[in-house]
Image (spheres, rainbow, N blue to C red):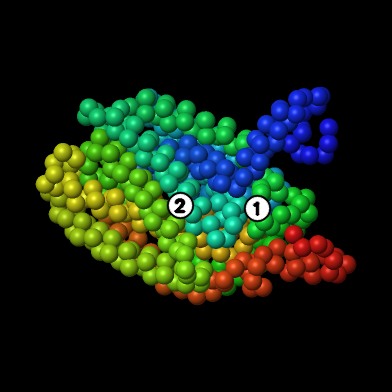
Amino acid sequence: MGNDPVDIFEGSSPSGARRQRSLAYRVWTYPWFQIGLISLICFCCPGMFNALTGIGGSGQVDQTVSANANVALLSAMAGTALFVVGPIFERIGPRACLLVGGWTYPLYAGSLLCFNRTANGAFVIAAGAILGIGASFLWVAQGAIMTTYVPESQKGRAIAVFWIIFNLGGGIGSLASFGMNYHSTSGTVSDGTYIALLIIMGIGWLLGALICPPKSVRTETIEKSSETERNWKELVMLTLKTMCDWRVLSMLPLFYCANVFYSYQQNIVNGMTFNIRTRSLNGALYWMAQMVGGLIMGCLLDIPGLNRQWRARVNWLFLFVTGMAIWGGGYAFQLWYDRRTAQGKKQDIDYTDNSISVGPMFLYIFYGMYDAFWQSFCYWLMGALSNSPTVAAILVGSYKTFQSVGGAMAWRLGAMGKSAMLQFAVDWGLCMGSLVLAIPAVLAVTLTNTDDSSLNDVDMKNLQADTSVDGPVDRPKA
């Protein structure tokens, strides 16, 4: 056999079979196939997890255990995503990262199934912490794939495709929960709901074996480098230099706020306002709204006729205006919610009661859409800094770290029983304030990632003088 990487089987075979393997290899290494594959994996794993959390309290009447599990999850994720998983990604690649992290999702679903039978809250919280570590591996790999496997002009579309398929998981999972719990009066989802989601999560974990390494992806813009080219000291130095870049520093408040509103929206707006079947329906509508939001933002981020600098500015303005409008509507809801709570009303609204259900349900839908706007913009800004998978993994690691810190803070406020109005005010203020603080990074977006001021060159040139014992080493650019 020759050196062609597609001829991987020993022994003779018909030329037709060789051509068929060659076609399969070309499909496997096609950037958009990999984008679709990572989207499907996230459909099965974090998508089904979102279906659980979107119901409110992960489908339980007592939301304290779920809130504390989320605090454990986000704390573990914050502690591992940047300085643990980011450097490991460089050594083992995205496929191994997905296989290491994916199994923790069915474990978490299984812990909730166990809780339904045994009320073992400690197991749920421990599973949440383990999931936090696993989710770090999954999301760092996902972010590196989504932001570097396609050409620069198509990154907005890649984000849109991912967001649609990924959130379809949350939508379908929530619809399944809606059907399974349609006649429920217990306030807790059925065992069958947890079992179904556990099986789907397991399938997603196994699909991680099909992910293609960066060096094999068929695109000219991706920066390919040897997985053993850097030692651990170089990787740590690269991480520190990337994180100390002033553009990254001004983006960190955006990252911090990326999940800060989940606790309030899912546990208060949905979890404490509606009955169990309407919460499931709202969860489906929330994630489907994210699909629409991802599509809208993907189109805006790749607007033809505008260069990348102007697309950054237009989309920042869009995010600020829509945020003020949606959160302003949320303030009206919160005043109404406080009046109802004072009357002792909670978890009582059914979707069939049009006189009071329509407004809060549409608000929840718009909250979901805005989440897609926010996260799509964050990913696009990260992709606008570098085409290097290693740098992208570091950026996504920082994104997930600060996102998790913000989310843990918010879930902890909920677990401590802080008032809904306080949670709402904190979320709104942080989100709008972080957009203002990100203006320098938005204005600094370059026309292309081949610009000298991009973070691509940090990958090699800036490290040589710092990490070489005998002085600068002349190495080929990655």
Q: Which residue is mark 2?
A: 160
Give percent across and percent down for residue 414. Answer: 34, 51
Q: Residues under labels 1 and 2: Cα distance? A: 19 Å
Give percent across and percent down for residue 292. Answer: 36, 50
Q: Nearer the viewer, residue 419 or 227?
A: 227
Please report the residue visible at 24 percent of the width from the left and 38 percent of the height from the top: 278
Q: Nearer the viewer, residue 232 or 43?
A: 43
Q: Secondary structure at mark 2?
A: helix
Q: Secondary structure at mark 1?
A: loop
Location of residue 415 with respect to 182 vertically, above or below: below
Few, some or many C-alpha atoms within 10 Å of disc 1 (few <14, some 14-19, many ≥20)? some
Give percent across and percent down for residue 463. Answer: 75, 66
Give percent across and percent down for residue 436. Answer: 41, 72
Given the image, on which type of amino acid does mark 2 rest? Ala
Q: Nearer the viewer, residue 384 or 236?
A: 384
Query: Any mark on residue 219, and which?
Result: 1
* Comparing labels 1 and 2, the label whose residue is closer to the camera: 1
Going by the image, does 241 lie left or right of 327?
Answer: right
Q: Is residue 99 visible?
A: no
Few, some or many C-alpha atoms within 10 Å of disc 2 (few <14, some 14-19, many ≥20)? many
Which image quadrant for residue 276?
Answer: top left
Going by the image, does 96 lie left or right of 475?
Answer: left
* Earlier-in-chain disc, 1 versus 2: 2
Please report the residue visible at 51 percent of the width from the left and 52 percent of the height from the top: 158
Q: Is residue 385 visible?
A: yes
Which image quadrant for residue 314?
Answer: bottom left
Please report the residue visible at 77 percent of the width from the left and 63 percent of the height from the top: 477
Going by the image, does 454 lie left or right of 70?
Answer: right
